[in-house]
Image: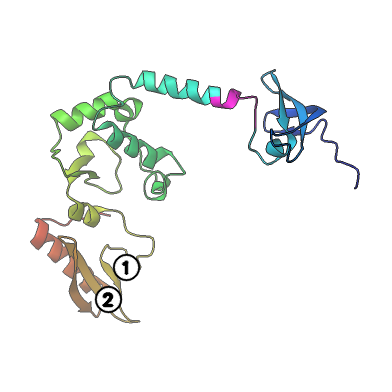
Amino acid sequence: MGKLTDYTGDKYGRLTAVKEVGPYIPPSNSYRSRQYLFKCDCGNEIVAQITAVRIGNTRSCGCINKERIIKQNKKNAIYKGYSGHKHFKRWKGMIERCYYQKHKDYHNYGGRGIKVCDEWRSHPKLFIEWVENESNYRKGLTLDRLDVNGNYEPNNCTFSNHTTQVLNRNIMLTNTSGYPGVTKHTDNRWRARININKKRISLGVYDTKEAAIEARKNAEIETYGKVLYKK
């Protein structure tokens, strides 16, 4: 057997290895695992299996989890009386889409510079009051923006059904025409489509992109009474 690696002085997360101590032996006595005494950045000392520390399963003496709980409790205290409200989740989703880079839709919102107005961002109270007292909210509708390039604020927000919101959303990154529902059909022709009542309807194939976009706009006006997409 080769010489065992000495991990004394190595740091993993918040833990620094001080010295090796006796091995961990489970009740079954089926194996032995090397253990070290670790000093945490917070000043506490713990004994832990070196394998667990090296692979990241143990990153502190437990202070990371304590800090996380304290932080969550502070957040809950700030939102006390609102975190259980039926519109709180809607507010939280709006905030995360605009400011949480790991959110699956961040690239379509915060990644494009879309923000939430200061009064709504600071606390859910004013947003919830707007929903209940000033908006057109009804069960089954979802939060939408009138100008898809504009921010979340009272004069740019409304509630829409799914079909309207799909038409009003930002252009997909794969879109080749610059207008929703208009895509390349062949090298020289363009296809226009529109979704109505969750059904995708073809509006025809056109010789120019401009003609296909015009057909799409006319369909929007005929169906919804206005052109829904604004650049």
Q: Quadrant of residue 87?
A: top left
Q: Which residue is mark 1?
A: 177
The residue located at (91%, 47%) in the rendering is: 2
Task: Give the left or right position of residue 7, taking residue 105 as reference.
Answer: right
Name the kind of residue labelled 2 in the image: Trp
- How far across and down, in percent of the image, does residue 112 sit? 39, 48
Q: Is residue 77 above or below residue 110?
A: above
Name the kind of residue labelled 1 in the image: Ser
Residue 64 shown in magenta:
yes
Q: Quadrant of residue 128?
A: top left
Could you say whether the residue bearing mark 2 is in a helix, strand or loop? Answer: strand
Residue in front for this viewpoint, 188 or 136: 136
Residue span colored magenta:
59-65
- How far across and down, in percent of the image, does residue 110 sit? 40, 43
Give residue 190's mark.
Answer: 2
> What whole-number distance in Å separates the C-alpha atoms at marks 2 and 1?
9 Å
The residue located at (79%, 33%) in the rendering is: 10
Could you say whether the residue bearing mark 1 is in a helix, strand or loop? Answer: loop
Quarter placement of the C terminus: bottom left
Residue in front for this viewpoint, 9 or 20: 20
Residue furthest toward the front?
28
- How far across and down, in percent of the image, does residue 7 sit? 82, 35
